[in-house]
Image (cartoon, rainbow, N blue to C red):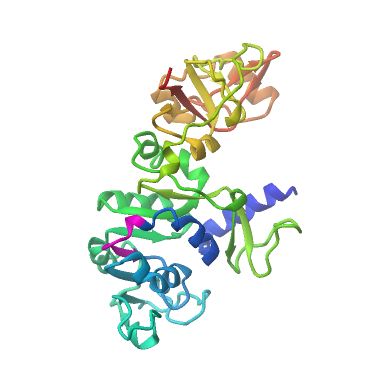
Amino acid sequence: MSKTKAQNKSLQLAKEHKKDEFYTQLSDIERELKYYKHHFKDKVVYCNCDDPRVSNFFHYFSYNFEKLGLKKLITTCYKNQNMDLFSQNDSEQAIYLEYTGDKNGNNVPDPNEIGIKYLKGDGDFRSKESIELLKQADIVVTNPPFSLFREYVSQLIEYDKKFVIVGHQNAIKYKEIFPLIRDNKIWLGYGFKGGAGHFINEHYEDYATATDRKEGMIRVSGVHWFTNLEINKRHEDLILYKKYTPEEYPKFENYDAINVDVTKDIPVDYDGMIGVPITFMDKYNPDQFEIIGVGIANLGLEIGIQPYKPEHKKYRKEIQKRGAVDGDLYMMIDGVVTVPYSRIIIKRKKK
């Protein structure tokens, strides 16, 4: 089994068993949040997937409380009552904490300044108690369970909260998430070093290579920060240099757009529809490009991507032995049905 397939299989198993709690390193939190510091002044920050006794999110905000000018820090955790990242979540009662800053002037969050309070329920972010705490918050910052990402984001949108959260880039193409991306209600942050995060998770087999292995941690490629806080990065133009040629940029068989395999190869002189990989979103500038849609299943049909021609669907299923979902983009390359992995359709704004 290849490393990628093995990693995907383990991620799926983690999802199925709800063991997808990937605890974030302090260095990764510091690297991302340094770009958002001005957003936190006089704000209530809520970390609602974090045991404050062990969370690096709590550590970051409590130790930088005065530097950031925070108003209040609230953290809750799901069921855990033991000072252990991997308690079995077997208690139905959870804790929460409200920290309002240093009281004795040493600029350190001392234990007697951090009062632990008990919730009546299990601390699930969807519980009534947790929602009441969410209502107090201005900005939510955490690493929610990947398996609940859709529901988690939906709640943040419902309560009109600003946020900086960790998720997997594959979430971009979720039918619940993509419309928010397309409508510029969510975008990607600065990201993890090397496009991958190292997390603490004892339920997940480490497939990191020897050069990027970190003791006691697992490496997950494709993770990213999702936010709706304004950052400079999303207004930086993508510098392009390649010229369009029909030979290098084939058109899709079922939609009037050209295919681009690598973001940096988007032709600088093409003004029509362009299909780009989802990694484009890391470079997306809404002043430079407009997002039209995504070429996947029903979301593809919604933007006018034509269903498979009968002969191509038959070829795909009977000859290639692959799935043929109407709404997916495909090309004919030398007579062969060719389906690229998840394409976002964009159009240039600037002339």
- In this rendering, is residue 102 above or below 181? below
Q: Could you tell me residue 1's position as x and y percent?
A: 75, 49
Q: What residue sits 47% from the left and 38% below the top?
A: 173
Splitting the image into 4 quarters, where does residue 148 fall?
A: bottom left
Q: How many marks?
A: 0
Residue lying furthest bottom in this view?
112
- In this rendering, is residue 206 above or below 344? below
Q: Could you tell me residue 89's position as x and y percent?
A: 46, 74
Residue 45 can be seen, yes or no: yes
Left or right relative to 250: residue 125: left
Left or right relative to 141: residue 128: left
- In this rendering, is residue 296 above or below 110? above
- Frontmost residue, 137 versus 60: 60
Q: Could you tell me residue 271's position as x and y percent?
A: 47, 15
Q: Is residue 235 magenta?
A: no
Residue stretch rendered in magenta on the structure: 38-47
The C terminus lies in which quarter of the figure? top left
Q: What residue sits 62% from the left and 12% below the top?
A: 245
Residue 340 can be seen, yes or no: no
Left or right relative to 201: residue 120: left
Left or right relative to 317: residue 63: left
Q: What residue sits 53% from the left and 57% below the top?
A: 16
Q: Is residue 45 magenta?
A: yes
Splitting the image into 4 quarters, where does residue 235 fall?
A: top left
Q: Could you tell me residue 195's position as x and y percent?
A: 59, 48
- Frontmost residue, 213 versus 33: 33
